[in-house]
Image (cartoon, helix red, strand yellow):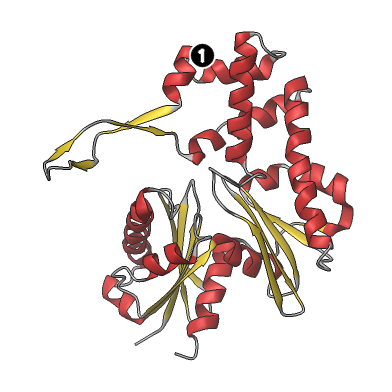
Amino acid sequence: MPTYYLGVDGGGTNCRVRLADENLVTLAEVKNGRSNLQIDDGEPAWKAISDGTRDVFAAAGIDYGQTASTYACFGMAGGRMHTAREAFANRPWPFAGVKVFDDIDIAHAGALGGEDGGVIIVGTGSAALAMVKGERYQAGGWGFQIGDQMSGAILGRELLRYSVEAEDGLVEASPLTKAVVAALGGDNQAVMSWSFATDKNVRIVGDDGSEGHEDLLVGRAPAEFGKLAPLFIDHYEKGDPVARRMMDLQMSYVDTYVSWFRARGVDKMAVVGGFGQRLMPLLKERYGEFVRLPLYEPLHGAVLLARHYFAKT
């Protein structure tokens, strides 16, 4: 029975699944929904990977039963906590073996091809990882509520907050702030309504043991704030003054990580993530040869790690 390797790049916006043969030749690749482990106890991630696995085997023309001879590696957004990774790995997967990593691990494996150096993820979320002479250093990646400073989601949230203040007349408005408010309904009342979502599918158990359902008010997911990043970039390129100030804030976050890398002997830093790729011209201008594009994408890093951990199984 042939051996297959399945890699997952489980991002906060999209989940990508790749199936490869024992020589890491890609047989098929598909994209599915969001897959952050911290959202709804990993249920959306479970569904995205489960559905993606069926889709990728179908796309490759391989019977789904061959998952029994497939070794999988998942690199997951929201995978900073080891308890979340362990719980997700222990779900009833159909594979011969499963390893669950933080998404920064597959980014590093792909970006530097196994060499020493640093990697930052700058996408919906953000994180950093360095490998130097056998030592592993990790920072960030603590999620939307308390971390992810370099991310598109945090930038979108800060931009939205500023735009609401500008609409109130508290700070300077600009074409960008007007465009943000217009995109979310046209005034602060509409923006406030947008910022919350109602979940009608939560089971409520009362103190007396009774069960029922009620609407719960919950915040928008990080990816929803990250969707403002293209609007931000468009206005930055047009010289919008608020966009310029927001970009200064964004770069100050990256500066912090660059300093952290250099203090640990890192001599190069690859940048991974959609938002980071949009920022590469500015990053090259700011950091010179220290910053570089990745050798391979994180999804390839996931397949590499799958073979690394299971090739001798």
Q: Name which residue lies at 73% across and 30% down.
A: 246
Number of labels in the image equals 1
Q: Amino acid at mark 1?
A: Asn
Q: Residue furthest top?
A: 169
Q: Is residue 288 left or right of residue 114?
A: right
Q: Name which residue lies at 48% across and 66% down.
A: 82
**Image quadrant for the N terminus?**
bottom left
Residue 279, above or below 99: above
Residue 178, above or below 71: above
* Residue 78 visible (yes or no): yes
Quadrant in the rendering for residue 120: bottom right
- Find numbered disc 1 in the image and state the secondary structure of the residue it sits on: helix
| Viewer-side residue, 77 vs 30 | 77
Q: Identify the residue under disc 1.
A: 188
Question: Where residue 11 sits: x, y (%)?
Answer: 50, 52
Residue 93, above or below 309: above
Q: Name which residue lies at 57% across and 53% down.
A: 142
